[in-house]
Image: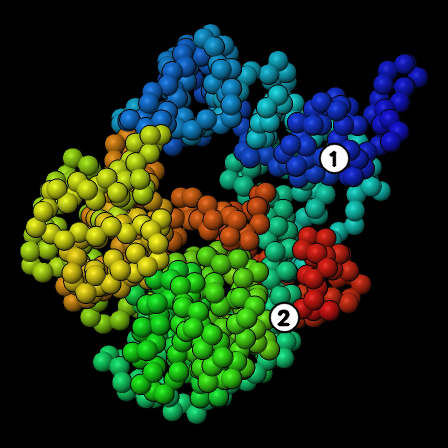
């Protein structure tokens, strides 16, 4: 490629015009070496550099001296490094770093509980001049910074504008240098090189959006008069870029949803006979939330296009029974259903419940897992192919090639976030566009459901069946463990049973945590009169089933386990859940584990035991668990604490890595973007209008040629 510089009349090199697809190495001051650094972060062209957005802004008008700092302030402080130190957090390998700085008015500590990148703290030597930007917090009565931005004083700093963008530092590239490259890029891209507006003009007008180009300019060259709005990510530039990120995702989900509606499916209009018989056979009445969810499902099943619906419900809210009712509708129509669960324990539990509730109504129910014997498997598959089996429940074994249905019209997937998209797709392909129902006991905040599962309709079961006993939750430190075990033994003497959960299977030399195997041995010695079982993921399926059967039958008083019991274990007599090292579990895991008790009529208890050197964040998480048993409130809090990628598990969720949008902060913009995306397809279901061609191109570019399959 030709050089992007030329000599002026005075002999100096000047930059020539840039394009968005110009390789970054040709930008003045970059070159091959720095371009390689950028490339490691996915930035190879000028256009990709412009989408490297500031992570924050520093308003130097907020610059203060240390003595004047107040808790809650977001400030900029020019200071001198006093010392850098680190201390071990308890007996673990984790360290807390402390960079102490001072100015003429006083001294302040900058605490770090993780290392931003290798070599970060080696930069700060005593007497070095630095700028610290961050939020002042109160830690044990003392003002501190936690994870502030600390950067070298830039020689040109005094000449900078009052509002300065701060970028995620790339090793070897300061935020000031990155900003200079961005300003140069914006100055040298001529008007004719900027692409035309991709969003339809009516969307830009109706939602009061500035142009994409203007947004990029203002994001990197902030207007000092809008300092507070920049600090809060609420400028017109932020709004435009956030809206666009959400819009592209929602347009893709809308196109998928439109495609589902076009698929030729099987309308299932049962006579209601089996549903009535089931309801009459139950020893309790369905909750209003269960009735409402089933009516939504039933209405979908009666349509000629396949249902794509998710049932969200808390642990023990009765989702499975609602899914069984859907299977009864399929059976009334003479067709087949299947239910795929993520573990053998859960599949077997569903099977036992189906035998208890559906078999008396005449349904033939089968179970297929990895441990199904060859002879049983052969007979089961033959019955399935002949249409003699109404409802097949199983694990991943259901997606194997030899599993063939005669007339599959309903696919139910439990805890769908544990399965990949391909696995769910294989199961769906075993029928002719069957109806698709997914269940999750992981309550998902509405904002996240709209993005990750935006192509599904959602039913929510937010009531608990009558008779479920409330669970009393207490968080204690390890020093109170003896009292917790004493309380547990008193409950066992009364005839109850207990779970004790550990984060590890076996002792680790690197991590100072209690493990299930060694603690199982300790408990056997401590409680010789109690029968204690051990359950963990490394055991063979037959061993796990034997232990669970003994615990269900009351032969074991205590079950020592890892998180293998997180989903699907139902023992009504167990009313004590003790979770060791609760700080090591996520909120969703803690909620699922707690949901293993409170399933009978006995008063139930969950005791979360914290280890040593627990972070403030871990304390907040566990303390929140004491305050509520509402899974949806817990999910909202979890999302705020961890962010969407961590909340879902980025790999499984399919959630895009938003560069600027934040699902918690920007919920209102998400709703607008979703509304706009669905309106586009309502106006032009196949994206044939001239102004919608850029939308077709963007969908294909981002999601591949199959992205348009639903609307083409």
The residue under the point 54% across, 33% down is: 56
In the rendered image, which quarter is residue 163 located in? top right
The residue under the point 48% across, 88% down is: 334
Check the image and report above or below for 124 versus 334.
above
Q: Earlier in the sequence, mark 2 or mark 1?
A: 1
* Residue placed under numbered mark 1 in the picture: 46
* Residue 65 coordinates in the image, percent (x, y): 43, 17
Tag 2's secondary structure? helix
Tag 1's secondary structure? helix
* Residue placed under numbered mark 2 in the picture: 258
Query: Most extreme residue toward the right, as rendered?
Result: 9
In depth, the one of 478 and 100 nearer the eye is: 478
- Badge 1: few (under 14), some or many (20 or more) residues near its Cα, within 10 Å? many
The residue under the point 68% across, 35% down is: 43
* Residue 554 coordinates in the image, percent (x, y): 16, 62
Query: Most extreme residue toward the top, as rendered?
Result: 127
Side of 567 where 473 appears, left or right: left
Side of 21 where 75 appears, left or right: left
């Amino acid at each position: 490629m030709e050089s992007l510089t030329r000599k002026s009349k005075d002999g100096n090199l000047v930059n020539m015009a840039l394009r968005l697809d110009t390789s970054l190495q040709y930008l003045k001051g970059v070159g091959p070496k720095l371009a390689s650094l950028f490339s490691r972060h996915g930035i190879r062209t000028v256009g990709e550099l412009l989408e490297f957005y500031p992570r924050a802004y520093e308003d130097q008008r907020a610059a203060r001296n240390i003595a004047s700092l107040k808790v809650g302030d977001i400030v900029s402080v020019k200071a001198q490094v006093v010392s850098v130190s680190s201390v071990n957090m308890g007996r673990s390998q984790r360290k807390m770093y402390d960079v102490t700085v001072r100015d003429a008015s006083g001294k302040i500590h900058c605490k770090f509980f993780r290392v931003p990148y290798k070599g970060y703290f080696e930069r700060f030597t005593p007497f070095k001049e630095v700028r610290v930007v961050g939020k002042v917090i109160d830690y044990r009565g003392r003002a501190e910074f936690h994870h502030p931005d600390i950067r070298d004083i830039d020689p040109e700093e005094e000449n900078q504008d009052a509002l300065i963008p701060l970028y995620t530092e790339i090793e070897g590239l300061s935020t000031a240098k990155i900003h200079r490259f961005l300003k140069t890029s914006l100055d040298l891209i001529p008007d004719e090189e900027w692409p035309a507006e991709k969003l339809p003009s009516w969307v830009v007008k109706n939602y009061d959006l500035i142009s994409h180009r203007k947004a990029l300019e203002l994001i990197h060259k902030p207007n000092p008069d809008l300092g507070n709005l920049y600090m809060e990510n609420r400028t017109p530039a932020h709004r435009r870029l956030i809206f666009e990120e959400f819009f592209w995702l929602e347009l893709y989900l809308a196109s998928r949803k439109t495609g589902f509606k076009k698929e030729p499916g099987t309308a299932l209009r049962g006579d209601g006979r089996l549903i009535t018989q089931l309801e009459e056979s139950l020893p309790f009445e369905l909750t209003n939330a269960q009735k409402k969810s089933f009516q939504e499902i039933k209405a979908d099943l009666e349509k000629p296009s396949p249902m794509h619906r998710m049932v969200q419900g808390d642990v023990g809210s009765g989702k499975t029974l609602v899914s069984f009712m859907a299977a009864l509708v399929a059976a009334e129509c003479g067709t087949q259903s299947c239910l795929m669960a993520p573990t053998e324990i859960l599949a077997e539990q569903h099977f036992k419940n189906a035998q208890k509730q559906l078999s008396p109504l005449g349904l033939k129910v089968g179970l297929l897992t990895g441990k199904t014997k060859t002879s049983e498997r052969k007979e089961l598959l033959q019955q399935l192919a002949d249409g003699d089996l109404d409802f097949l429940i199983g694990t991943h074994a259901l997606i194997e090639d030899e599993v063939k249905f005669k007339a599959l019209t309903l696919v139910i997937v439990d805890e769908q976030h544990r399965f990949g998209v391909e696995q769910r797709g294989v199961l769906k392909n075993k029928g002719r566009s069957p109806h698709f129902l997914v269940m999750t006991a992981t309550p998902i905040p509405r904002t996240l459901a709209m993005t990750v599962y935006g192509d599904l309709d959602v039913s929510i079961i937010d009531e608990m069946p009558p008779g479920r006993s409330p669970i009393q939750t207490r968080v204690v430190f390890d020093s109170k463990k003896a009292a917790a075990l004493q309380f547990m033994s008193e409950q066992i003497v009364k005839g109850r049973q207990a779970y004790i959960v550990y984060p590890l299977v076996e002792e680790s030399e690197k991590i100072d945590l209690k493990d299930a195997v060694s603690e199982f041995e300790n408990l056997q010695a401590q409680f010789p009169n109690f029968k204690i079982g051990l359950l963990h993921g490394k055991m063979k399926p037959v061993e796990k089933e034997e232990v669970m059967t003994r615990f269900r039958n009351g032969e074991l008083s205590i079950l020592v386990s890892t998180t293998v019991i997180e989903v699907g274990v139902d023992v009504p007599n167990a009313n004590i859940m003790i979770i060791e090292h609760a700080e090591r579990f996520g909120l969703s895991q803690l909620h699922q584990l707690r949901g293993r008790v409170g399933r009978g009529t006995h008063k139930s208890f969950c005791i979360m035991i914290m280890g040593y050197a627990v972070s403030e964040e871990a304390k907040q998480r566990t303390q929140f668990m004491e305050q509520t048993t509402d899974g949806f409130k817990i999910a909202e809090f979890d999302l705020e604490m961890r962010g969407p990628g961590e909340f879902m598990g980025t790999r499984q969720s399919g959630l895009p890595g938003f560069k600027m949008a934040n699902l918690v902060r920007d919920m209102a913009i998400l709703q607008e973007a979703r509304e706009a995306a669905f309106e586009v397809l309502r106006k032009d279901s196949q994206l044939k209008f001239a102004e919608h061609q850029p939308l077709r191109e963007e969908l294909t570019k981002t999601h591949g040629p199959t992205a348009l399959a639903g609307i083409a």
